[in-house]
Image: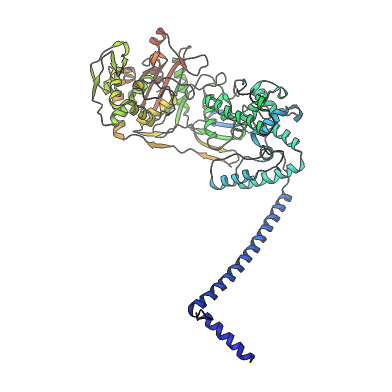
Amino acid sequence: MEQVVTQSRRDVRAAQLSGGGAGTRGGGRGGGGQGRTGWKKWAIGTLKWGSIVAGVLLVLGIVGVVIAYNQTAIPQPNDLANKQVSIVYYSDGKTELDRIAVQDGNRESVKLNRVPKYVQDAHIAAEDRTFYQNNGISVGGILRAVKTSVTGEAQVGGSTITQQYVKNYFLTQDRTLSRKAREILIAVKIDGQLSKAEILEKYLNTIYYGRGAYGIQSAAKAYFGKDVGKLTVSEGAVLASVLNAPSLYDPANGERARANLENRYAYVLNGMVEEGWLSAADRAKHTELPKILPYKGAKSSAGPNGYITAQVKRELLTTGLTDREIDNGGLRIVTTIDKKAQTAAVAAMKDNLPKQVTGGLVAIKPGDGAVVAMYGGPDYAKDQLNTSTQAILQGGSNFKPFGVLAAVRKGISTKTKFDGDTPQTIAGTTINNFEDTSYGKVDMRRMIGRSINTAFVNLNEQIGPAATRQAAIDAGIPANTPGLGTDLTNILGTASPHVIDMASAYSTIASQGVRTKPYFVKKVTSSTGDFTYDAKPQTKRAFDQDVTADVTDAMTYTVKPGGTATKIGRTLDRPVAGKTGTSEENRSKWFSGFIPQLAVSVGMYKPTPDGKSSQKLSPQESSLYDGSTIPANIWLDFM
């Protein structure tokens, strides 16, 4: 009987496997139901084994972390005290242009009790609001660091105060996952071995604040000329703000940096209120930035070359390097600056500029964007305002070629004639020519050559001021340039760009319509070889070649007989196109022009007391310094 039962079960199982039905449902339906049960068992079994494997891996991971933690020793302090000078070279990569070095004796450690509590709180509000609660690390910051290393994205913040201290004092500044892992393990160990007060004291004595200042005491003297113990709430908030990125927040670096600081300053103070470290009433007393001392710069960055070094530093910050790495990382920085061209630029400005006026010169390689020469002032140690990249000058007649660009782009020939008589009232605006000279009907080539205001405004009325504005932007004038609007007279240069902007825009015409972004840094390597950077020119076609060819031809009339800069045409034995420029009320004078290999802009102005903009020249000064004389002479001497 037992044998029969066994055989029967075997037959049933065979029928099931062959797809036969069993039970009242019969057929394939029965077999299918039993198959799903088998798959379910398999899936459940797999999940169980997967869970076991995951659990084992988790345990192994934890064990690995524990082992790594136990085997990671707190290292000796790094070479922070033995800072390596970064050297800046000319474009040949061999001739030294400058050195980026901080002044000696820029660190003075202080006890935490000498730092006012509100200054401590400001730093914690700025950098790590969970400092007193965390165990030395930030999980969110760790995840962002992993993403940055894997994807190559721009570096973002998020490290705790303890992690920053560990990185600055014990480790290097490279951004590998292995370095980040060591930082995390050491930070946890440090947090377990030192009190929060000890960590904060060491952090405040090692962090870099810019201006060559390491530590809170040096920073207090560099920015406010006082001992750390005498800092006010607002001064403490400023220092807590600038350490995030000194070159971006130090107001000595220009109006944009000051605006950045104002935003960061508000963030810090508001954070102190949110954490209960500052009352709303006290916060209301600190709405304005305190008075910050001007920065005289390191002695190594003096003279005209100091402006180049400062510009190089600003550009390097966009590559992901920090101020500390640039100032003390032993970098070897090869610039785009040609020594012969730079020497000629400095000599041309020095020999021609009268004492009561100043100006800038920028020379750019068309089609590439490399800045081969720049004059930003006579001595960076005395005045940090760069007359080529920071001062703004009303563009004047240098803008007229942008109107011609817009017209030719619309299909209007440069041989088209416009009314050049004076005076004229056009769309309700009265326009006069220089010295009230009338020219009758003139084409665009003669309009540029003689710089005829009335004819250009008539042209602008026909094509529309918006077209002229867009042509200027497409050529390289920033859209946010002060005064760059769509009024009828924008073609006469009512906007106020930087000299480097004008050089960039003219280089677009010189390169047959290819716009490039100006740059100063060609190559960077670190002394240890763990960082390299090679510049890649950023180019974009902005105009058709036929358009810029016609405009270039028209601009040659400036240096031909009858033009406003005929001396250049008589002197240089090579093709030259350019434009003189005189702004409204004689506030600035220009000559911008190019040969196929080089675009050069020279801007000259009489500075206001703060040096940031221009003031009106007297009639005598204006007659002596128009665009066809001094700026053109500087341009010619440079070439």
- Percent position of residue 510, x then y: 35, 30
Vertical side of 316 occupied by 385: above or below = above
Q: Residue at x 49, y 76 (%)?
A: 29
Q: Is 618 in front, or is 57?
A: 57
Q: Position of residue 533 (x, y in %)?
A: 52, 39
Residue projecting furthest to the top = 620
Q: Is residue 188 visible?
A: yes
Q: Quadrant of the image for the N terminus? A: bottom right
Outermost residue toward the front in this view: 24
Residue at x 59%, y 85% (from the top left corner): 9
User: Quarter-wise, where is residue 565 in the image?
Assistant: top left
Where is residue 285 drawn, in percent x and y?
64, 22
Give the answer, above or below, for where 283 lies relative to 179: above
Looking at the picture, how far across and down is residue 286, in whole percent? 63, 23
Q: Quadrant of residue 83?
A: top right
322 lies above or below 416: below
